[in-house]
Image (spheres, helix red, strand yellow):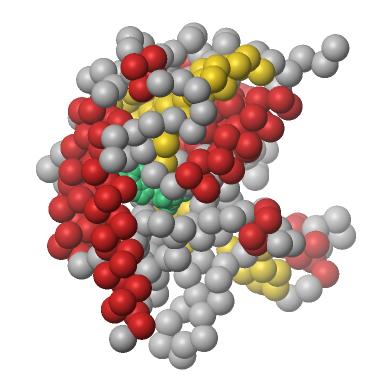
Amino acid sequence: MVHRKTATRKRKRRRVIRSRPPHLLTCSSRSIGTAHLFTCSPAHLFRGKAAAPPGGRAEIRLVLGDCIHGLSCLDAKSVDAVVTSPPYNAGKDYNTYDDSVPRDEYLAWTREWGQAVVRVLSNRGSFFLNIGGKPSDPWVAFDVLSVFRDLLVLQNVIHWVKSIAIERQDLPVRRRTDPSNPLAAGESVTFGHYQPINAERYLNACHEYVFHFTRRGNVPLDRLAVGVPYQDKSNVNRWTIGAKDVRCRGNTWFIPYETIQNRDKDRPHPATFPVKLPEMCLKLHGLSRIHLAMDPFLGLGSTAVACANLGVAFVGFEIDKKYMTESCRRVAEALKKKMPRS
Ligand SMILES: C[S@@+](CC[C@H](N)C(=O)[O-])C[C@H]1O[C@@H](n2cnc3c(N)ncnc32)[C@H](O)[C@@H]1O
């Protein structure tokens, strides 16, 4: 009974929020270091091409409001890279958003915002869609994927690994005996964090997907920008491309969450990704090819922070004021770190 009551109340709230046009938390615009934290009226926000040249002075634009409405105000094909993680319909306890609506309603909404994203994606743009699920509902990622099947081409599937256990016996012999290698001391080591599940029938969920979509499936990528050194150094000279001792990382990306002490204080949101994830997506697309990046579901603004760190112009949307406040704080902090020291 309690659940139903809560769900009804939340569903009601969600409708109200979604019908509200975007507005901004503050009406100010200020320069911080080499970048520019930009919050102003929607009229200012959406006119013309937003971006400064990559690597130069980049504007980070954070909009409080519904992304579908907000995206309709952006110019068509004006966004070169989208990195986002929508709600997964997995019953997460968001501050206002109801994350447990009927699946068909959720997928119809996914199509709606998906079409809005496709409209603003540039011809050579990349759309990185992070989605997980929960062990009792592993279909959600594939249901969402199928929504995009007739909208875009699935160019790559990346596996974001949050935690992994590596056994000593699976290491190459020289690593097993290397005293500086922490693995050499024990039988197995687990890296990263995950939410443990108390159920005999399910495995702990240690990974999520990042689906990489493009319009035609032929967007060249800067694979070496997120590359890794060769394990066998004889490859460095054998392959011309390996001359710099860097090879393609492949599609399994181990990116652990930062260890936090206090969830409410350090990460007040139930479903964020680490800033490194959008950073790697943006670099993979190629920073010099991004005039504007976008995230329709800001949450705590991890993609905005990644853009602030990389000097990439950005616009993002979030319906929840509490999360938006935290986004602004995190972006301001990232921008301050980029300020030249006097
Ligand atoms: C999975 S979270 C995104 C987390 C983000 N990637 C991060 O690292 O912080 C999804 C977010 O979408 C927001 N949201 C839900 N519906 C929205 C809408 N119609 N427009 C904008 N934001 C929305 C939710 O409040 C939630 O914060």
**x%, y% of residue 186?**
78, 73
For residue 322, side relative to residue 291 (left or right): right
Q: Nearer the viewer, residue 183 or 96?
A: 96
Compared with 44, 102 (above or below) is below
Closer-to-camera residue (133/314) = 314
Q: Residue at x 41, y 57 (%)?
A: 96
Task: Write down the quadrant of residue 117 in the picture.
Answer: top left
Q: Position of residue 29 (x, y in %)?
A: 55, 17
- Which residue is depicted at the point 71% across and 25% down? 336
Looking at the image, the residue that sits furthest to the bottom is 200
* Number of numbered labels in the structure image: 0
Query: Where's residue 69, x and y in %?
Result: 25, 34
**Quadrant of the frame with the N terminus:** bottom left
Is residue 99 found left or right of 258 in the rendered image?
left
**Residue 45 placement: quadrant:** top left
Q: Is residue 240 above or below residue 104?
A: above
Which of the pair 120/128 is nearer the observer? 120
Q: Nearer the viewer, residue 88 or 139?
A: 88
Q: Residue at x 54, y 20 (%)?
A: 28
Looking at the image, the residue that sits furthest to the left is 150
Q: Is residue 67 left or right of residue 288?
A: left
Is residue 287 visible from the viewing direction of this image? no
Residue 72 seen in the current view: yes
Q: Quadrant of the C terminus?
A: top right
Residue 133 position within the rendered picture, expressed as x and y whole percent measured from the top left: 37, 65
Task: Tell me where residue 237 sits by quadrant.
Answer: top right
